[in-house]
Image: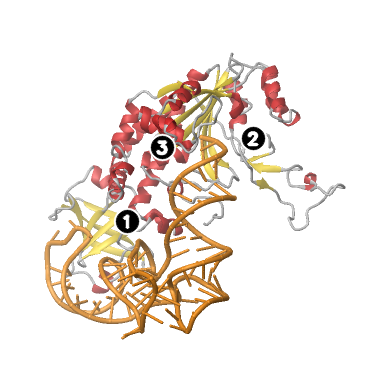
Amino acid sequence: MAKLSSIKDIYQSPEIGASYKVQGWVRTFRGNQFCALSDGSTVKTLQIVVDRDTTDPELINKIKTGAAIVVTGTLVESQGAGQSVEIQAQELKIVGESDPSVYPLQPKKHSLEFLREIAHLRFRTNTFSAIFRVRHAIAFSIHKFFNDRGFFYIHSPIVTGSDAEGAGEMFQVTTLDLNNPPKNEDGSINFKEDFFGKATNLTVSGQLEAELAALALSKVYTFGPTFRAENSNTTRHLAEFWMIEPEVAFANLVDNMDLAEDMLKYVLNYCMENCADDLQFLQNRLENEEKSKPMAERSPMPLIEKLKFCADNEFVRLTYTEAINILKNSKPNKKKKFQFVIEEWGADLQSEHERYLVEKHFKKPVILTDYPKNIKAFYMRLNEDDNTVAAMDILFPGIGEIVGGSQREERLDKLEKRMTEMDIPHEEMDWFLDTRRFGTCEHAGFGLGFERLVLFITGMSNIRDVIPFPRTPGNAQF
RNA sequence: GCUUCUUUAGCUCAGCUGGUUAGAGCAUCUGACUGUUAAUCAGAGGGUCCAAGGUUCAAGUCCUUGAAGGAGCGCCA
């Protein structure tokens, strides 16, 4: 009796001579005899050998790229050089035909831009199936990391009534008739008649809600979609992206950095152990792609070596002030090669400065801390100098900012003073301030952009290629 | 939002200083071959040159506007 097996299982423990049933999609069919079958369980394909003499020619004629088939046959050692084992087909059924003259995926290389336009089919390519298997492994390992350390997964709301988070432009959520909205006497829209009885938006961050939970459950994290209506057109921004936001009570900035560094290294190690085939495939893809680029633009080390390097080395930790001094004395700054020359303390760092620190100066991941309070959010804890806040950003080579976090301001008076200075309405945030009124304590957390981590680990260069259906300005296809 | 580049066959691209009938590779189809690995060989089909307007005897080629896409910057994760 043939047992139904995934291609991954067959390669993991092949039983030569045993009868197998496999199902998947045809990648290529060579010489009317050799079918490369993929079922998505692994980046590898399984070779199905069809007997030309005993198989109905009409059936053979339907074995085309993209067709879904079910095959029963015997696993044998392959006579060919390209694979160790193969299935000698005894029974082959076409489940879903595919007409190659109109099927968009041809047995040839396609550009990532073209595949982005047919995102509903790009799962069927080696590259994208590898990316999404790795994406899954990253998500799973993040949950495992936190679970193993006693964190609780908090589901923060996606529709929010709070508009004071200040993390970015928000998408409004409404059921009002946009052509004829109810008005107040002064002509403004009357949101009391809206679904929730007030104006609501899609969340830009689950952090404030995570803080509420942390001040009771001690160690929590969120992992959910977030939405920013910013008109950002770059290779590392999405309007809809997934964010991981741990929050820990009785923790300071150093605890926070340790947690973030441990988590990133854990995920890197998990992927190297569990996605070796996919990472190897993605590494080869990257190498091929970079062959046509000048040496200076190529990756300094192969993908897997880069991941190992980041997992094995301490991240560099330095303060904003130290970073400014390094940048001020750097060659590109003195020679005015930077588009924005660093003149004095207090300037916001541009991506060219972050790239210089990470890729040229230290050549490893960098954690920058203690930024000027004026360029950071209201909830970050004010340092003793009254001038900087206990913030930290983790910068990765090729990606830039991957983590942004801070120790939170737990002192009610100092928090309210900051909110006043930054024009944040206190009434709106009363629920948040309650945590500081009752049983406040030191706490800290950070936000990790999930897709940026997937970008880094897969070696891809456009964030639109590491999420199944990217949402960007002017584009919400599928 | 700003800067810049691209748009020609299903895909990736070439097309010179504006000049006769629009080019290649791959893919597709037909045939041959058959233990292939980007299979091979022979042949065939396939074009609103992104759109609109303009300059010109003549526009794929030059100009204007628009659309779509890429890259960089800003905002950030």
The answer to whether residue A380 shows anywhere in this view is yes
Give the Cα distance between marks 3 and 2.
28 Å
Of badges 3 and 1, the one in the foreground is 3
Q: Relative to residue A199, is residue A187 drawn left or right?
A: right
Query: Which residue appears at 28% of the width and 35% of the height?
Result: A305
**Residue A166 disc label:** 2
Secondary structure category for the residue under label 1:
strand
Residue A379 lies, with reference to residue A93, above or below; the image says above
Tell me the subunit letter for badge 3. Answer: A
Between A314 and A441, the one lying in front of the other is A314
Question: Residue A80 has which mark?
Answer: none
Could you tell me which residue is drawn at 34 percent across and 31 percent down?
A269
Question: Which residue is the site of mark 1?
Answer: A23
- Which mark sits nearer the N-terminus, 2 or 1? 1
How packed mark 3 is, by other alpha carbons closer than 10 Å (few <14, some 14-19, many 20 or more), is many
Badges 3 and 2, same chain = yes
Residue furthest top in the image? A384
> Pointer 2 indicates a residue of which chain?
A
| Snapshot quadrant of residue B42 | bottom left
How packed mark 1 is, by other alpha carbons closer than 10 Å (few <14, some 14-19, many 20 or more), is: many
Residue situated in front as seen by the camera: A87 or A176 = A176
Find numbered disc 3 in the image and state the secondary structure of the residue it sits on. Answer: helix
